Image (cartoon, coloured by chain):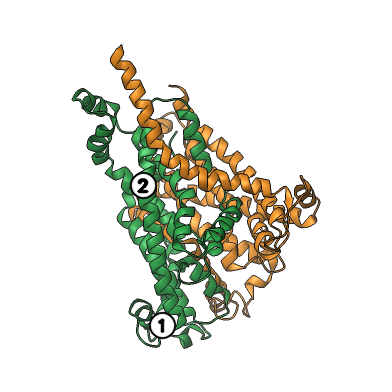
Chain colours: A green, B orange
């Protein structure tokens, strides 16, 4: 009896937690498929009577006469994808080799270097933005995706080093010693032994870096001015600032911007949880 | 002996070569800029491009610290940080424990928690701003239909209310992060611990306070520090939901820095402010790193 009661109570709490997660998202999705008149009706139409996917069609399949909102989202989604992917690849390449050296090789200042690299991850963006802005304007990089890629490395690279270092620590040294005995030097060991078994670490690190770069707003806000470099968070924020222009279009942009990170996280959820544990709960 | 030395030398060479690219990148895009910012904070920087900067020493810091606006902003920043992180920790711990009890649907809940965590911050803010909308928002609609309010409320026009609603959006995003970290930590605790405790006559509450909570302490501390650093410099959510308003009611320190730099054109003062933020976050980061790397020191 007591056990049944406990299960009922716990199930109720699970339900509450699920509502907490899903109600706001549901409203975001519903708003994106509601017509303008239904969005602006009182009392609220919780379930749209005439759901429409026109907003999605406008953004994803360009045609003559689509709205400015749709055009902006299409271009900025593409910019975001380019920037986040480039940052992820660069951070993974340089970050993992640096992490490997910091964890496995013995040389002076190793520990100091590791700790200072971790420290730079914590520097707030706002403390870097003015010099970077001045640099960008001086070298003609203002409002270019390249300056965003360079700038995002300021958090992506230390982050990648940090996560990969935690991962390399978990690989047994014996594996490398065996390779050494077989006559591999350090670089060969790294290439032939470590890299192949590092796939989980690389996937999880790449995922975190991609999500953070996709999410980034402040640098993009300051360093871009037109759709040739703007990322999707900047586009969304701009439309939010204007009063109720095209709520449906905006919500659709929001859903589309959320789909890549949410899908990736769900597909690789095993890596997310282990990444949080390795990176964050270590020690 | 000879071979050993060559190996060590090889290690050193390879090590520096592998680190060099990252080191140069970090030097160029983190260390150089933050030192420039520190330098700039000692100057009064006029708005025009070719005007000379005037050296004012600690003048920017002194004038900031003597202004009520600064202290009001610090107060709001601490309010935001303490309330949001506090609630997130309590709810996150509660949800982690709920998942750990394995009730029906716990796996689905664990998976679902990833969604708010993965939704981009700006999308999160836009979504809540639309929910809070005075004329057509879901919050007014829901409360009105439930009969809890008799007319629509312009939520974001009251400073204190606006602040709490920004906090709510932050909570939605971050509770899942804490819950996921803590449930992973809970899963690593020995499973027969609770049984042993109850054999020894410990009540569920005693078990929670004296056994589970102390064992979770490292995970809690880490989650706490990461979240505190993030909340202290929160900018994105405030920018989208309230843009600092109403009546500066949601201007926290990052937002004030942004305004000083890019709206008021006070690059020097803005730099001073941003350096104060760095100082605070780096102190927390230092504590954090000390905690993470404690095991390594034993080697």
Q: In which chain is the residue bearing label 1? A: A
* Residue at image point 40% right, 32% down: B16
Image x and y of residue B258, in percent: 64, 60
Image x and y of residue A226, in percent: 50, 71
Image x and y of residue B52, in percent: 73, 56
Question: Mark 2 or mark 1, which has the lower sequence index?
Answer: 1
Query: Residue A182 appears in which quarter of the rendering?
Result: top left
Closest to the observer, B89 or B122: B122
B16 lies left or right of B205 = left
A191 lies left or right of B252 = left
Q: Report if residue A46 is visible in the image.
A: no
Task: Work out whether A57 lies above or below B208.
Answer: below
What distance separates the C-alpha of mark 2 from that of mark 1? 44 Å
- Label 1 CA crowd tier, 10 Å (few <14, some 14–19, many 20+): some
- Label 2 CA crowd tier, 10 Å (few <14, some 14–19, many 20+): many
Circle 1 sits on which residue? A48
Q: Report if residue B75 is visible in the image.
A: yes
Image x and y of residue A81, in percent: 38, 63
> Which quadrant of the rendered structure holds the C terminus of chain B?
top left
Q: In which chain is the residue bearing label 2? A: A
Please identify the residue farthest to the top as the structure is shown: B1
What is the count of numbered marks?
Answer: 2
Tag in front: 2 or 1: 2
Marks 2/1 same chain: yes
Circle 2 sits on which residue? A92
- For numbered disc 1, what is the local secondary structure? loop
Task: Work out whether B253 lies above or below A186.
Answer: below
Closest to the observer, B183 or B291: B291
Task: Work out whether A228 lies above or below A96.
Answer: below
Closest to the observer, A283 or B99: A283
A56 lies left or right of A198 = right
* Residue at image point 62% right, 67% down: B243
């Amino acid at each position: 009896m007591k056990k049944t009661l406990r299960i009922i109570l716990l199930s109720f709490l699970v339900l509450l937690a699920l509502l907490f997660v899903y109600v706001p998202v549901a409203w975001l999705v519903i708003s994106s498929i509601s017509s303008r008149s239904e969005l602006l009706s009182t009392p609220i139409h919780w379930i749209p009577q005439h759901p429409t996917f026109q907003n999605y069609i406008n953004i994803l399949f360009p045609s003559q006469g689509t709205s400015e909102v749709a055009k902006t989202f299409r271009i900025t989604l593409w910019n975001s994808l380019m920037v986040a992917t480039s940052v992820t690849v660069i951070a993974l390449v340089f970050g993992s080799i640096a992490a490997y050296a910091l964890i496995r090789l013995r040389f002076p200042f190793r520990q100091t270097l590791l700790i200072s690299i971790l420290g730079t991850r914590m520097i707030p963006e706002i403390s870097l933005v003015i010099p970077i802005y001045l640099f960008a304007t001086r070298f003609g990089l203002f409002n270019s995706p390249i300056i965003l890629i360079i700038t995002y490395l300021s958090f992506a690279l230390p982050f990648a080093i940090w996560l990969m270092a935690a991962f390399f620590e978990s690989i047994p040294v014996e594996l490398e010693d065996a390779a050494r005995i077989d006559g591999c030097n350090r670089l060969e060991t790294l290439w032939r032994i470590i890299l192949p078994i590092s796939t989980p670490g690389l996937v999880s690190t790449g995922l975190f870096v991609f999500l953070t770069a996709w999410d980034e707003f402040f640098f993009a806000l300051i360093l871009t001015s037109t759709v040739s470099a703007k990322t999707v968070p900047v586009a969304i924020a701009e439309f939010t600032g204007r009063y109720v222009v095209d709520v449906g279009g905006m919500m659709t942009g929001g859903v589309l911007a959320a789909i890549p990170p949410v899908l990736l996280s769900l597909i690789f959820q095993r890596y997310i949880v282990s990444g949080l544990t390795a990176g964050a709960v270590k020690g | 002996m000879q071979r050993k030395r060559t190996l060590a030398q090889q290690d050193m060479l390879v090590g520096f070569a592998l680190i060099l690219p990252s080191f140069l990148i970090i030097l160029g895009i983190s260390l150089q800029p933050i030192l420039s910012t520190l330098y700039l904070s000692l100057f009064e920087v006029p708005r025009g491009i070719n005007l000379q900067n005037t050296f004012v020493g600690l003048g920017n810091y002194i004038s900031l610290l003597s202004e009520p606006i600064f202290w009001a902003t610090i107060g709001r920043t601490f309010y935001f940080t303490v309330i949001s992180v506090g609630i997130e920790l309590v709810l996150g711990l509660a949800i982690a424990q709920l998942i750990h009890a394995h009730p029906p649907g716990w796996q689905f809940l664990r998976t679902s928690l990833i969604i708010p965590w993965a939704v981009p911050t700006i999308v999160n803010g836009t979504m809540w701003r639309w929910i809070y909308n005075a004329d057509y928002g879901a919050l007014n609609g829901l409360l009105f239909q439930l009969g809890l309010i008799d007319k629509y409320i312009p939520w974001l026009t009251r400073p204190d209310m606006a602040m709490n609603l920004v906090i709510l959006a932050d909570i939605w995003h971050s509770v899942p992060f804490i819950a996921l970290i803590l449930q992973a930590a809970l899963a690593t605790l020995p499973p027969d611990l609770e049984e042993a405790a109850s054999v020894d006559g410990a009540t569920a509450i005693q078990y929670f306070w004296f056994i589970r909570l102390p064992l979770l302490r490292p995970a809690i501390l880490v989650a706490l520090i990461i979240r505190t650093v993030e909340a202290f410099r929160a900018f994105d959510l405030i920018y989208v939901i309230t843009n600092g308003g109403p009546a500066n009611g949601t201007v926290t320190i990052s937002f004030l820095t942004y305004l000083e730099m890019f709206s008021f054109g006070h690059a020097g003062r803005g730099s001073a402010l941003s350096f104060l933020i760095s100082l605070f976050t780096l102190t927390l980061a230092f504590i954090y790193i000390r905690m993470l790397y404690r095991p390594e020191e034993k080697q």
